[in-house]
Image: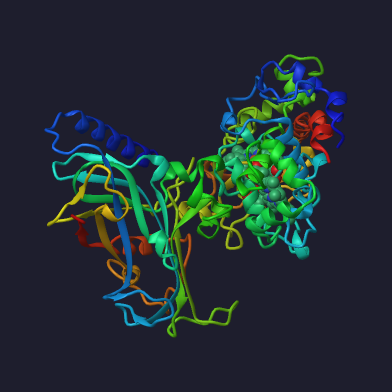
Amino acid sequence: MKNAFFGLLALLITFTLTNCKKTEEEVKGLGDVVIEMDNHAGDEILEFGKSYVTAGGDTVKFTTFNYFVSNFILTKDDGTQYLVPKDSCYFLCQHDDVDSREIVLHNIPAGDYKSVQFIIGVDSLKSVSPVGDRKGVLDPTGAAAGMYWSWNSGYIFVKVEGTSPQAPVDAGTGERTLEYHTGLFGGKDSPTLNNLKTVKITSTSESARVRDGHTGDEAPVFHLYVDILEMFTTPNSFRVADVPTSHAGPFSQKVAENYADMFTLDHVHNHQ
Amino acid sequence: MQPDFYKVTGISKGLILGVLSVLLLFSCKKDEPSYEVFLPSNFPAPAYDLSQNPVTTAGFELGRKLFYDPIMSRDSTIACADCHISFSAFSHPQHATSHGIDGLFGRRNALPVQNLIWQTSYFWDGGVGQLDLIPLNAITNPVEMDESPAHVVAKLNRHRQYPALFREAFPGGDSVTGPHMLQALAQFMSMLVSANSRYDHYVRHEAGGDMSQQELAGLQVFQQKCATCHATDLFTDQTYRNNGILDNFTLDRGRNEVSSLPEDIGKFRVPSLRNVALTGSYMHNGKFKTLEAVLDHYASGVKDSPTLDPLLKQNGQLGIPLTAEEKQSILAFLQTLTDQDFVNDERFQK
């Protein structure tokens, strides 16, 4: 947790330092940036209930695909960074709620941004905060109820559920179910596993052009593909027969390493 | 629970005597006494930030009502207070492991609810790191209350009294919300401070602090042989350790279940020993019924395993050497940690 804190502090300092440098301001004002999370299974657009094949050769169908993304940092072409403020940097993306997968970052200083960085999950500071500081998607009695472990007061960062004929029969439900709930932020006063992963997406071609007053449909979009099948492979390919479920145990580390690269940039879309 | 109750009871003697007590918030109505959280001078600074959820009269009373109300469980049969009983410092006396809904038995011995604002983590494995969030564990646990927070909130909203009580405790809100429910319970639990035992009066040089020769001898042995782990006047250093009550932890891996770190298998939070004479059975699994049995364990029953605390295996010798006389004096000393003011405080009862 200390590390995460100092990491953020370092970023904050970098941000303020770089910000102090007076660059020639061509564009001024504030606009929006949209991060679109386009869920896929391999090359196909993800649909619940449809069969897909993992890299290991297992046939899988999905019923749940939810993930938290937070702590967004945008980088301009000149290297200047903009840290999205803490009070508006937590998002819960749920596959069956399209709106939740269109993340809108408001009041971004105008400029050309080539990259976006974020954490998969909820950072350690927020994970130990009092309930009054857990609003909206972070409310463990509300929106986050299904994404929160009450016995381990931490959020589930990525929740994948489904079925597979290759999975063993679950004694409780009698079905061949898959259940991968991954969390663990590193612990409060004593360490735990830390499965927080940082993703940095950089556009090698077009940058997102944020302009004053350009919000809604006028805002530039980082269009990302989120491949659910990545959770089963690279670097720790596994078969669902061997690991049909994973929660807070040691295997969660491998699942998190796998899904860390499920976000890729399809394209940046500018509307003008 | 008449409104006049508070005028009659007033502030307990302990609060007036308490060397350091901080006035937190004045209640809106002038004629009602304000609530103070007792911050004893022999305790360190609290870990919980009281300013982000200040204790108010209405909030505290609402929290108490919720704590005693079985509406919090799936079939409305079990309340927090059924497992956390005031006369035993809000623990579950005589029960090795607590039974909850449908008569199901949990794996673990209920912990007392006291001095929570000084703790940094909660439960035997430290799984919960925020006082506010403790109730969610009990509410959702299938062998405790087996309920969903959203459903409890819905039931509270349909209730005759609760919506008005929530509006009073949290002005500005128009209905019962989950976070407010948690904050009200947290306000009630913040107030559960036990620091008026005979031992406390002794260390604070207050009236009522007389200790016998044997009790003082016990304190001395305790400081030598137990206080490394049961440290400070909270009687815990808040770390996770294996004190050798078992050598196989497949039934309950303790801290490892939270951390997933192999070195944490069999480690449990060092519990406070305040009111320990009232809180038996002892240990996370309720293995020992009496304090005598606990001392016999430390003297001659410690079991070896890879994560056994090194303090309990010094010079290749298992356990803590204790003579019969030392055991008697420790037992006498532990009795001085009982806080009658706390367990009899009417403000904390139904």
Of all residues, the one furthest to the bottom in this rendering is: A165
**Quarter placement of the N terminus of chain A:** top left
Q: Position of residue B149 (x, y in %)?
A: 64, 55
Measured along the vertical axis of the image, is residue B267 above or below residue B205? below
- Residue at left 74%, top 42%? B164
- Seen from the viewer's position, the closer of residues B320 and A98 is A98
Residue B280 in sight: no
**Quarter placement of the C terminus of chain A:** bottom left
Residue A42 horizontal side relative to residue A139, left or right: left
- Seen from the viewer's position, the closer of residues A248 and A52 is A52
Q: Position of residue A243 (x, y in %)?
A: 43, 73
Measured along the vertical axis of the image, is residue B16 above or below residue B325? above
Residue A134 in sight: yes
| Colour scheme employed for the rendering of this structure | rainbow
Measured along the vertical axis of the image, is residue B206 above or below residue B108? above
Measured along the vertical axis of the image, is residue B5 above or below residue A71? above
Residue A186 horizontal side relative to residue B343, left or right: left
Q: Position of residue B5 (x, y in %)?
A: 86, 30
Residue A264 horizontal side relative to residue A251, left or right: left
- Seen from the viewer's position, the closer of residues A86 and A269 is A269
Q: Position of residue B168 (x, y in %)?
A: 71, 36
